[in-house]
Every structure is written in structure tokens, then in C-alpha cells.
Image (cartoon, rainbow, N blue to C red):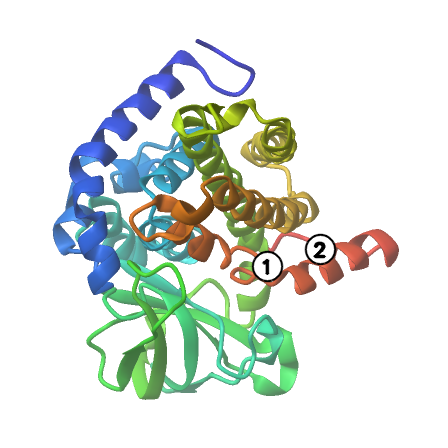
Amino acid sequence: MSTRYFTEEHELFRQSLKDFLQKEVVPHIEKWEKTGHIERFIWEKFGEMGFFGIAYPEEYGGMNLDLFYTVIFLEELQKVNSGGFAAAIWAHAYLAMTHLNKEGDEAIKQKYLAPSITGEKIGCLCITEPFGGSDVAGMRTTAVKKGDTYVINGSKTFITNGVYSDYLVVCAKTNPELGNKGISIFVMDRETSGISATKLDKLGWRASDTGEIAFDNVTIPAANLMGEEGKGFPYIMQHFALERLIMGINAHARAEFALEYAQNYMSERQAFGKTIDRFQALRHTFADCYADMIVCKEFNYSIAERLNKGEYVVKEATISKLRSTKMSDEVIYQCLQFLGGYGYMEEYPMARLARDSRLGPIGGGTSEILREIIAKMVLDNKDYKPAT
């Protein structure tokens, strides 16, 4: 059934992805949530199915499909009820790999991007620092050029796939005195001497490995510089539009999943001689939640369409993340309430959904930072330009 955004081919892809997730992923989710370690075999299965290559060039093993295949991929990942698993997968496929594809030279693409598409290598993106948070320009990690090498010193934190990944895409200052104009971006192998990682214990996203990473005189070849020296900040900003839209799509998808579960529960749960979906107070609250979710979903689709056409939608993607993550928190909070005491029990999905959703307004730029970005663009006529 074709719609404005999705063709019959899209829907066939959605169904095959659903079947794959139910068969290969869902049976292992509880174990991964408990151990905080997603086993290696599933990455390879994703690679075998071509899911990591959806958005990438065919010459590296990808399929170069339109952005709505990615939308479907993200939406269905949210419906296995593990924000951590979903985050590990999309952080590899759309954070680390995006930089490899956009800034990496041919040698880097052959060494890192191609095996990332097959699932042989797992990547992470290292931007956030312990003292910087959302202040990317304030990063302290340095990369000093010495002959045909760079020496990296510093630390990163809150890095998804930060412990078990095979390579790291790392932002560091090559010219600290230039502020955000002195940031460059590198790729390095996990086993490089001087890299150490500590696993963080989180409220939610329990299945994913989130790490604090230290770089102690890490020496890498100068050829591991991606793009131009000093252009790291605009590269990061350029890709934030995709990251923020991804988090907006994730938010509407998990809210939709919560509502679907709540609707089914309410249609079966009886109180005072009737199912609780017959009580006006609950019906009207559900209607409000559903309306809020649909507004965000339709907005996100419209922005995905514009991004797919090559438009630079940094303002709109920022709005997507800001509003959708707020909506998701509010909707899931209310869906938990629909379940009453059962919503607070770990054997029901709402407890995990509530924990996992709370990361939305924090990760990828806090809501406070996003409001300031929107204010600058609207009130101060600030114009962010793409780097490439």
C-alpha cells in the first residue's frame, strides 16, 4: 500500500526487517539487557542481511537506498523494547559510519567502511568529553602532529559502543588556540596502544556498552586524519542534522510502540465490569497522547523527505529532536500510568521504555542546547552552513 512517503517496496522491507528482528534479536534482548554486552554474532547477521549498508554506496557493499528505508530501520529497532540495543546499532550505522563515508578517503573506506557494512567491524563516534558535555567547541582532547603521525591525549565520555567497538572516530583539537576552528577528526583502531575504556553503569539503555575513553599518548598515522585538518567542527555540525532527526524518529517510534501496547492492554484489562478503554478519562488521555505522537511523526517524515532531497535541515532536525523526545517522555509516562501497578513491574515493557526514553532529551545535544540553537537561528538570524 503506497503512501506519500512509503512505496510497496518500503513496506516489503519493513516486513522482512520485522521478521528478522523477531527471529534473531528479540529472543536475546533480556540477556543483553542483563549483561550490557550485545554478542558479536548479531552484528554479523545484520551485515549479512545488508541492514548496515542501507544508506551507503554500492562500491563498499552498500545499497544506496533512499532515506525512508533508514526511517523504517530506525522505527522497527525501537519496537524490540531495548533502547540500548537500538542505540548500539544506529550509533554504528549512522554516527561512526557517516563520518567514514563523508570524510574518509578511499583507503579509510576500504579498511573501515566496507567491513562496517558487513558487520565485521563495529565503530563508535567520540565527541563528548567529561568537562564539555554539549559544549563541543570546548573539547580538551588534543592531537599533536609529529612527523607523519599524530599523538592524541585526552578523554571522551558517554560513548555508545565505547567499550566493545573495533575502531573509534575521534574528534580532537589540532590547533587549540583556534577554538572550534582548530578541531579535526580521526579514525583509530581499538587495539592502538594508549587507548583504554571504562564501562559506565546507566539508568537505561542497559544493553548498550557506554564508555568513558582515555587517550594516553596514542600515536596514529597522519593518514588517519579524515577530511581537512581544522574542519572537524563543521563536519560534526553538518552530521548533527541527521543525528537529531534520527533521535526524533526514534522518539516517535517508541511512543507509538508504547501506545500500541497500552491500547492492547486497555482493551483486555477489566475494572468495575468493563474494559478500561471504556472509561472517558483514560480514552481522552489516550487520544491526546496519540495526537501528540502523530503530529511529531508526520513532522519527522516531512523533514526526512527534505533531507532525502539534499536540503540542509539543521533547524528542522533540531526541532524534531526537541519536540519528539519531549513528547515521547510524556506519552510513555502516561502509558505506564494506564497499566497501573503493572506499569511499574519489570516483566511489563513500560518500566524499561520509561528509563530508555529519558535519554532522548539528553543525548545528541540536550534540549536546553537545542532551544538555544533554534533561538539563534530564528531570533539572531544565525545561518549554519554545511561543511561540504
x, y percent for residue 38: 21, 56
Q: Amino acid at mark 2?
A: Tyr
Q: What's the residue at 64%, 80% (across, down)?
A: 179
CB atoms of marks 2 and 1 within 8 Å: yes
Circle 1 sits in a helix, a strand or a loop, which is it?
A: helix
Report whether residue 328 is seen: yes
Q: What label sits on residue 177 in the rendered view?
A: none
For mark 2, what is the residue?
384
Label 2 crowding class (10 Å Cα cut-off): few <14, some 14-19, many 20+?
some
Q: What's the residue at 39%, 41% (across, down)?
A: 78
Q: Is residue 192 above or below residue 224?
A: below
Number of dots carrying numbers = 2
Q: Nearer the viewer, residue 330 or 16?
A: 330
Report whether residue 388 is seen: no
Q: Compute the Cα span from label 2 to label 1.
A: 8 Å
x, y percent for residue 20: 21, 32
Circle 2 sits in a helix, a strand or a loop, which is it?
A: loop
Q: What label sits on residue 237 in the rendered view?
A: 1
